[in-house]
Image (cartoon, rainbow, N blue to C red):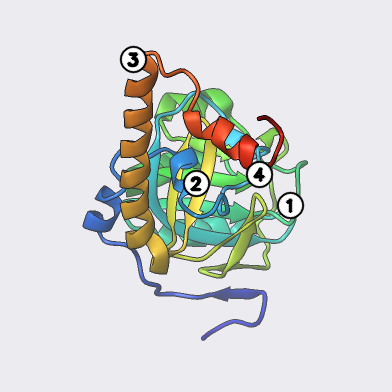
Amino acid sequence: MAGKVGFRVRAPWRRPDASLLAAFGTASSAQVADCMSRLGAMDSGIKPMWPSPRVVGAALTVWCHTGDNLMVHKALSLAAPGDILVMNTQGNVVNAGFGELLATSAVKIGVRAAIVDGVVRDADGLQALGLPVYARGLGPNGCNKDGPGEVGAIIACGGVAVRPGDVIVADRDGVAVVPLEDAAEVARLAAEQMAREQKRLAEIERGVLVRPEIDEALRKLKIIE
């Protein structure tokens, strides 16, 4: 591998195929997170920058030095249609590592979304492009392009480990990260979760407004008789 620790490109990596991504159907980030024992969801600071539609895709990971986005540019040169850019900025909330120019290239490449543990800029332009972008907020300051950084490394984003090729499910609730090796199982569990929720909604429509097992659990705990 060329480069050095902290300044290198780790490529290629394995990506989920289209059928695996399709297996997640319309499952929400919340439903997916529930199927991973309520682990794998990024913290609530990572939020959509505009009311964008749900998206599912493969993680393209970038680890940037604070105040620098050189490796984001390199990452886009390696992006494949269906990828979701996931970026660690070393906790920087002063310099925006992603904006309209990068987003325009990303859309033409076929990148489905960008998730930045930091801030972004050019809010109106991002929305006009139709690219779902998640971040901690907005800021006008740009970045240098000197490095270091890594592409294709395991990174932290929103308090969750993200590996290149992991499945990302993002919607208005937030972002769930599914390890690629667990993706088929989680997709199956998510389908079952969706079916259970539809069944419960039907029960509510019939007038069963509180699940009977709630009182059963409280009786076992001797909270009620």
Residue closest to the far front? 225
Question: Quarter of the image holding residue 54?
Answer: top left
Could you say where residue 224 lies in the image, as x and y percent from the top left? Answer: 68, 30
- Of the two numbered discs 4 and 3 on the same chain, state the one appearing first in sequence: 4
Front of the two marks 1 and 3: 3
Q: What element carries label 2?
A: helix
Q: Name the residue under label 3.
A: 206
Disc number placed over residue 34 in the picture, else none? 2
Disc number placed over residue 67 in the picture, else none? 1
Q: Are marks 4 and 3 in contact (CB under 8 Å)?
A: no
Cα–Cα gap, marks 1 and 2: 35 Å
Q: What element carries label 3?
A: loop
Could you say where residue 34 lies in the image, as x and y percent from the top left? Answer: 50, 46
Q: Which amino acid does label 4 sit on?
A: Asp
Q: What residue type is labelled 2?
A: Asp
Which residue does the image show at 42% across and 38% down from the upper left? 28
Q: Which amino acid does label 3 sit on?
A: Arg
The answer to whether one can see residue 100 in this image is no
Q: Is mark 1 on a helix, strand or loop?
A: loop
Q: Are marks 4 and 1 in contact (CB under 8 Å)?
A: no
Residue closest to the far left? 19
Q: Residues within 10 Å of mark 3 (few under 14, many from 20)?
A: few
Q: Residues within 10 Å of mark 2 (few under 14, many from 20)?
A: some
